[in-house]
Image (tube, helix red, strand yellow):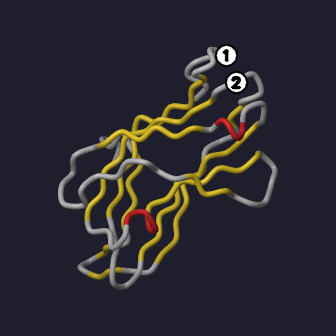
Amino acid sequence: DSSYKQMKASAFVSGVKHATESWLVSPKIDLSAATMPGLQFSHTHKFAGDATKELTLWVKEYGAADWTQVTIPTYGTNTNWTFVTAAVDLSAWAGKKVQIGFKYTSSTSAAATWEVKDVVVYDAGGAAAPLM
């Protein structure tokens, strides 16, 4: 639906909860000149079993195989569609090229709907903001 201006993930289809794993992966983001990179986004969800395990954020150096999970500091209530803003420190990847992945998982007992929007990568150190 072209009216959406965000990512939306759900595995609740026709009244049935499905077990899934789905990723939204960014293109390469160049943090070469960044000294204090960060990521900010808004998100909302409902119907999660444990949002901190089912709706997660990952970062990897571009070209690498392994992802590193990064803690999302702010989640909504799981009972309404109010968006909350999360800010994540990406300093561990300063000077590198990276990819960011939003990972959605569900099961036959919990299939959340997760929406993510307004994703911005920036440099609090002043290199260039926003970087993405």
**Of pointers 1 and 2, the one earlier in the residue sequence:** 2
The picture places residue 66, in percent across and down from the top left corner, at 75, 60
Q: Is residue 43 left or right of residue 91?
A: left
**Residue in the foreground of this view, choosing between 89 and 78:** 89
Mark pair 1, 2: CA separation = 5 Å
Amino acid on which the number 1 mark rests in the picture: Ala
Which circle marks residue 34 in the picture? 2
The 10 Å Cα crowd at callout 1, few under 14, some 14 to 19, many 20 or more, is some
| Callout 2 crowding tier (Cα within 10 Å): few <14, some 14–19, many ≥20 | many
Residue to which mark 1 is pinned: 127
Identify which residue is drawn at 33% across, 43% down: 4
Left or right: 18 with respect to 128? left
- Relative image position of residue 122 (x, y in whole percent): 57, 26
Q: Residue at x 70, y 24 (%)?
A: 34
Compared across the picture, whether 87 is left or right of 30 comes to left
Please name the residue shown 65% across and 50% down the image.
59
Q: Are marks 1 and 2 in contact (CB under 8 Å)?
A: yes
Q: Position of residue 33 (x, y in %)?
A: 75, 22
Above or below, comparing residue 3 to residue 38 in the picture: below
Q: Which mark is residue 31?
A: none
Please provide percent x and percent y for residue 76.
28, 52
Between 35 and 49, the one nearer to me in the picture: 35
- Identity, as a three-letter code, of the amino acid under mark 2: Ala
- Residue most extreme to the right: 63
Q: Quadrant of residue 35?
A: top right
| Label 2: element kind | loop
Viewer-closest of 117 and 56: 56
Taking the spot 35% from the left edge, 46% from the top edge, the residue there is: 43
